[in-house]
Image: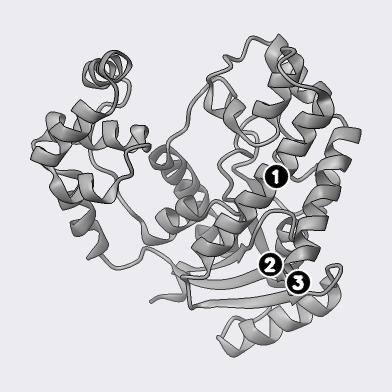
Amino acid sequence: MSEKKRVLCVVGPTACGKTKMGVLLAKQYGGEVVSVDSMQIYRGMTIGSAAPTAEEMEGVPHHMVAVADPAESWSVARFTREADRRVQDILARGKLPVLVGGTGLYLDALIDGRTFAAGQSGGAVRRELEERLAAEGIEPLLSELRQADPEAAARLHPGDEKRIIRALEVWRETGRTITEHNRETQRLPKRYDPLYIGLTFRDRGDLRARIDRRVDAMAAGGLLEEVRALRDRGVPREATALQAIGYKELLSWLDGETSLEAALDQVKLRSRQYAKRQLTWLRRNQAIHWICWEKEPDFAAGLQDATRFLSAQGLQCP
């Protein structure tokens, strides 16, 4: 693949130092960072989403951070379109796109150049399906999907209501199954030529402890006020942004449904569970060069390790 399509990806579970390593690598290779995080796109969520501050960016341009109103609901399709525009612009200016983030589905979709099945999300068909779900439950919808797209029905968990509705929406509006569309998409060559640097901790217990400390630091640094401000602005509680880890739990505290201590404990638990899911997703990718931290990240050593690997792959400093 052409060098013009080369991108660098910094991946790993939450709280492993991706933001810092992304900045270091962008400075080393003359790059610009594109955040690949499903929650950092929303404005007013800097603390809870661990979005990079101006100080943490160290002068490196960052894209796809705070670009959406938290009352909006961005799909992976919309994210991919917007992020791809930024990546293309960076490449056109002779810079290296450094894709940084832990939302694996979004990153894979961006790298692959995946297109998404047509269907008017939020249109009449979607509304009808959602009304049926509320009135009848998921089983009648899943039964309909089994008739239209048995492969998708077998693949999707009955609890995955959003994707079941999406698969039915595509079938009804296009006459083609989402399985058929996905199969065609997977046969296409990747849009970009990725190099992957993965960060994690050698001992899973050190990662869990770091996550817990970060939640405590977020709470001390203004997360509670950030959640309250979003609520006071009138962002609907069912908004996608407020389903993010940290926000949903603290809204329950603000509404008097739980204690602050219990809410923060739940944030820590869900963050640790999320990190486990991230690692499970990433470990399927054999192309990742992993850097394993000991008790704490050593970014100087990590940068040297990453540079050796990238040089061996033909990526040179400008």
Using the numbered discs, state the Cα–Cα distance from disc 1 to disc 3 in whole angstroms: 18 Å
On the image, the x and y values in percent for residue 269 come to 70, 44
Q: Quadrant of residue 30?
A: bottom right
Q: Residue at x 62, y 50 (%)?
A: 273
Q: Which residue does the numbered mark 1 point to in the structure image?
A: 269
Protein image colouring: one colour
Which amino acid type corresponds to the residue marked 1 in the rendered image?
Answer: Leu
Which amino acid type corresponds to the residue marked 3 in the rendered image?
Answer: Asp
Q: Quadrant of residue 318?
A: bottom right
Q: From where the camera sits, is residue 24 visible?
A: yes
Which amino acid type corresponds to the residue marked 2 in the rendered image?
Answer: Gly
Q: Residue at x 68, y 51 (%)?
A: 272
Q: Which residue does the numbered mark 2 point to in the structure image?
A: 30
Say what secondary structure mark 2 lies in. Answer: loop
The correct choice, above or below, for 117 with respect to 15 in the image is: above
On the image, the x and y values in percent for residue 67 come to 60, 33
The correct choice, above or below, for 12 with respect to 121 in the image is: below
Query: Mark 1 vs mark 2: which is more N-terminal?
Result: 2
Query: Mark 1 vs mark 3: which is more N-terminal?
Result: 3
Question: Taking 159 as reference, is 36 left or right?
Answer: right
On the image, the x and y values in percent for residue 158 come to 32, 38
